[in-house]
Image (tube, grey):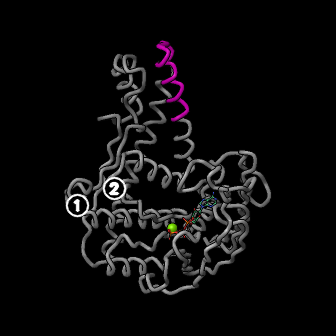
């Protein structure tokens, strides 16, 4: 998949911008604050329906403007062209594909594929479990619509059950069977993908460096030793006393985690900062590989700050490896820092005088 053009109105620091892109590597250069990451953010917004920096849409609106409008044309690997538009005016966000409005974000998840690499991705390794759950939930949802549907329903049912527990209503038990059914389905898929991602990480590591990465991912399902939806339901019943006391559901994939190991030691506890950063990058490469393989469609690569968190030789190696894996955008202050990768250079000028003046 590629994006061939991008139109911005009132988005972040851009009043108006119209760009077109080539299918290969695009290097976005420019001084700090010129708006490079904002361009990646706009592409991500179109592909995924949301920013990777904020859940607050109003922050995307250029200061002093009434709203934003972003448009992009995506071309899938088989040549199909789709126009995606996202706008937000008066706090009403709208998404449209080929001029037809999309009602929920769920309808666009998995249709336009982009994988973003951010310097902060190391939090995938050493951050909260919710980071890793989100990573896997998004990844699996991109390749499996049934998983996305189960996830949405699971969290809906969980919300009802927790609401009943909160007001100490005995009705919470009516949700148990459905919760267990959906929860078990989610757990099984998560388990499978933990293994698929670890295998893909090892493949990439070996292709990159010629040695074994020794990665393994252990999925902890948040529900303990369960082997079926029935045993999940039985555990829910066994935990009922505790749930009533805590006024919330204490077991299930919403409490799950994906623990990452390299050569049998847990990365978050034992690896160096550089090794953690590399593991996070490789996890994202695996994400792109697995989506590309399962969807037969290569996600666009959005690489912020050109992997400057890695040391120079690794950075050059990884960028070189990724450049042939689909359309790739990298941001960097100066083209000399692009790790030797060549491509179309778009110089993002610093736009001055646009912020409202405080008198
Ligand atoms: N809603 C907004 N309205 C106006 N300007 C904004 C808004 N949000 C962000 N900006 C400005 O956009 C500018 C560019 O941000 P961006 O993060 O894209 O820079 P960058 O080129 O990636 O810089 P760096 O090299 O430091 O990463 C910043 O100066 C920021 O203040
Ligand atoms: Mg930036």
Disc 2 to disc 1, C-alpha distance: 10 Å
Quarter of the image that includes the C terminus = bottom right
Magenta region, mostly helix, strand or loop? Answer: helix
Outermost residue toward the right in this view:
99
Q: Please say whether residue 298 is visible from this viewpoint.
A: no
- Label 2 sits on a secondary structure element that is helix
In percent of width and height, residue 346 lies at 60, 81
In percent of width and height, residue 343 lies at 54, 85
Residue position for label 2: 125
Instruction: Inspect the magenta stretch and tell me whether residue 171 lies in it.
Output: yes
In percent of width and height, residue 266 lies at 23, 54
Which is nearer the N-term, disc 2 or disc 1?
2
Q: Residue at x 53, y 51 (%)?
A: 141
In percent of width and height, residue 309 lies at 36, 69
Q: Nearer the viewer, residue 222 or 349?
A: 349
The magenta span reads 155-172
Q: Residue at x 56, y 75 (%)?
A: 327
Q: Are marks 2 and 1 in contact (CB under 8 Å)?
A: yes
Residue position for label 1: 271
């Amino acid at each position: 998949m590629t994006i061939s053009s991008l139109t911005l109105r009132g988005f972040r620091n851009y009043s108006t911008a119209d760009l077109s892109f080539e299918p290969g590597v695009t290097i976005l250069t420019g001084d700090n604050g010129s708006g490079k990451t904002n361009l990646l953010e706009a592409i991500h917004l179109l592909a995924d329906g949301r920013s990777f920096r904020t859940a607050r849409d109003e922050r995307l609106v250029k200061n002093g403007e009434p709203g934003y409008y972003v448009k992009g044309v995506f071309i899938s690997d088989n040549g199909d062209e789709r126009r995606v538009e996202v706008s937000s005016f008066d706090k009403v966000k709208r998404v449209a594909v080929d001029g037809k409005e999309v009602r929920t974000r769920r309808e666009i998840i998995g249709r336009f594929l982009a994988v973003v690499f951010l310097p902060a991705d190391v939090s995938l390794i050493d951050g909260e479990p919710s980071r890793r759950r989100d990573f896997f939930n998004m990844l699996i949802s991109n390749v499996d619509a049934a998983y996305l549907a189960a996830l949405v329903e699971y969290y809906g049912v969980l919300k009802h059950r927790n609401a009943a527990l909160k007001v100490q209503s005995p009705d919470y038990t009516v949700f148990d069977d459905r919760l267990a059914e959906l929860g078990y389905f989610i757990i099984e898929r998560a388990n499978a993908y933990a293994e698929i991602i670890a295998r893909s990480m090892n493949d990439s590591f070996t292709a990159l460096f010629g040695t074994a990465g020794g990665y393994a991912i252990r999925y902890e399902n948040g529900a303990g030793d369960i082997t079926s939806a029935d045993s999940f339901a039985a555990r829910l019943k066994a935990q009922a006393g505790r749930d009533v006391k805590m006024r919330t559901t204490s077991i299930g994939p919403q409490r799950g985690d994906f623990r990452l190991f390299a050569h049998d030691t847990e990365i978050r506890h034992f690896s160096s900062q550089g090794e953690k950063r590399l593991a996070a990058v490789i996890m994202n490469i695996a994400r792109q590989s697995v989506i590309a393989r399962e969807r037969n469609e290569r996600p666009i690569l959005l690489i912020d700050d050109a992997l400057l968190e890695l040391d120079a030789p690794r950075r050059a190696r990884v960028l070189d490896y990724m450049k042939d894996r689909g359309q790739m955008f990298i941001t960097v202050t100066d083209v000399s820092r692009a790790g030797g990768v060549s491509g179309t250079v778009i110089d993002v000028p610093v736009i001055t005088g646009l912020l409202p003046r405080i008198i």
